[in-house]
């Protein structure tokens, strides 16, 4: 009887992708918080980056529209330095 190899479960590193029109300036200030595009929550940075890139490319003609990847895992577990 063969044993199935143990698959090491990867640590879940949640990332949020959001976007919206921002005001001009150095700081990131959204024009209308009720209009923020909540793209989704992803299990790792690679998946979040794919979603971010797709949304950013779809809105390339709007100079005020910006999308961001938020590292939720850093907010949930600030003691982790990954």
Image: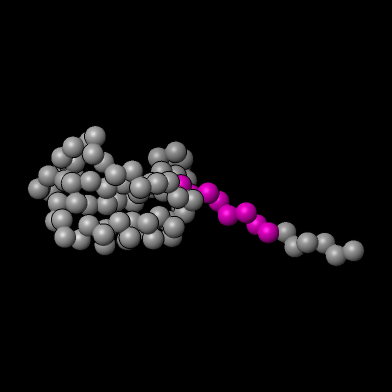
User: Magenta region's main secondary structure?
Assistant: loop
Residue that appears at 22% across and 36% down = 33
Give the percent coordinates (x, y) of residue 65: 19, 51
Residue 9 part of the magenta-drawn span: yes
Residue that appears at 23% across and 39% down = 35
Give the percent coordinates (x, y) of residue 26: 12, 48
> Which image quarter holds the N terminus?
bottom right
Residue 72 can be seen, yes or no: yes
Is the image coloured rainbow, by chain, by secondary structure, or in one colour? one colour
Residue 74 can be seen, yes or no: no
Image: magenta residue range: 7-14
Give the percent coordinates (x, y) of residue 78: 43, 41
Residue that appears at 31% across and 46% down = 18
In the image, 74: left or right of 33?
A: right
| Farthest top residue in view | 34
Q: Nearer the viewer, residue 5 or 31?
A: 31
């Amino acid at each position: 009887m063969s044993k199935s190899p143990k698959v090491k479960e990867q640590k879940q590193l949640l990332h949020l992708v959001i976007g919206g029109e921002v005001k001009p300036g150095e700081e990131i200030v959204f024009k209308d918080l009720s209009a923020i595009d909540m793209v989704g929550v992803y299990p790792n940075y690679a998946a979040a980056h794919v979603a971010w890139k797709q949304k950013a490319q779809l809105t390339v003609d709007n100079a005020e529209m910006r999308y961001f990847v938020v590292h939720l895992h850093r907010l949930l577990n600030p003691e982790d330095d990954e």
